[in-house]
Amino acid sequence: MRAPQLLLSNPDGWRMAGPGGFRRLPNGIIESYGGPGLFWYAQEAFGDFVLSIEWRIALPEDNSGVFLRAPPLKDDPQPAIERGYEVQIDDRGLDPAAQVFGSALHLTGAIYEQAPAVRRCSRAVAHWNYFEINASGPTISVRLNGEQVSLLENASREPRGHIGLQNHHEGSAVQFRNLRLLPG
């Protein structure tokens, strides 16, 4: 069995698409600022894998996401949104089209607009949360803090691609640490 890759420990492998970015903080933490953009791992594309990452928000309106199987990017994150998958971080569950809160397709742990989050299990603001995301063939499952929150079967977008972290909007500061990826 291969050892998990500690992907945030290699800053040279990451690229930024779009405005804003991520700042490095002590203890291996990175924090989003500005946006909308995507900090993506350009060194390798992945098909099947288990990805684990810790994250926390500073304010209730903070928003971000973990992207999977995204195509290579240049200056624009839009291809990742259209062809990859996003595991949502938005405890308000804001549906931007309808301008309503509480949408299961936009709630933390949902596979954005593809598979709803079936429960809320994020910890309070400023507390660390833990995602475990399993991508296996056409199935993507998401566990949040040990609870199964979403499942997408028969995924029809890219079967292989890059991973990324979203910086959503000015004023949103989501922190990430301990990103590990175990290729399948």
Image (tube, rainbow, N blue to C red):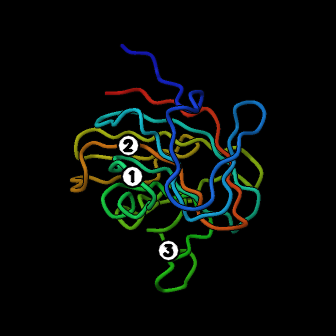
Query: Farthest top residue?
Result: 1
Residue type, label 1: Leu
Q: Which mark is residue 28?
A: none
Identity, as a three-letter code, of the amino acid under mark 2: His
User: Quadrant of residue 115 in the image?
Assistant: bottom left
State the residue position of label 1. 73
Q: What residue sits 66% from the left and 53% below the top?
A: 32
Q: Which residue is mark 3?
A: 103
In the rendered structure, are the residues bearing label 3 and label 1 in contact, judged by CB atoms less than 8 Å apart? no
Image coordinates for residue 66, horizontal then vertical, percent: 49, 50
Assess whether mark 1 and mark 2 are in contact (beta carbons under 8 angstroms): yes
* Closer-to-camera residue (125/119): 125
Between label 2 and label 1, give the one nearer the viewer. Answer: 1
Identify the residue shown where x is 68% and y is 42%: 30
Q: Which of the two discs, 3 and 1, labels the residue nearer the N terminus?
A: 1
| Disc 3 residue type (three-letter) | Ser
Q: Secondary structure at mark 2?
A: strand
Tell me the distance, in whole angstroms, between the alpha carbons under discs 2 and 1: 9 Å
Q: Nearer the N terminus, badge 3 or badge 2?
A: 3
The residue at which mark 2 appears reads as 162
Residue 89: x and y, percent? 57, 58
Label 2 vs 1, first from the N-terminus? 1
Q: Residue at x 68, y 57 (%)?
A: 33
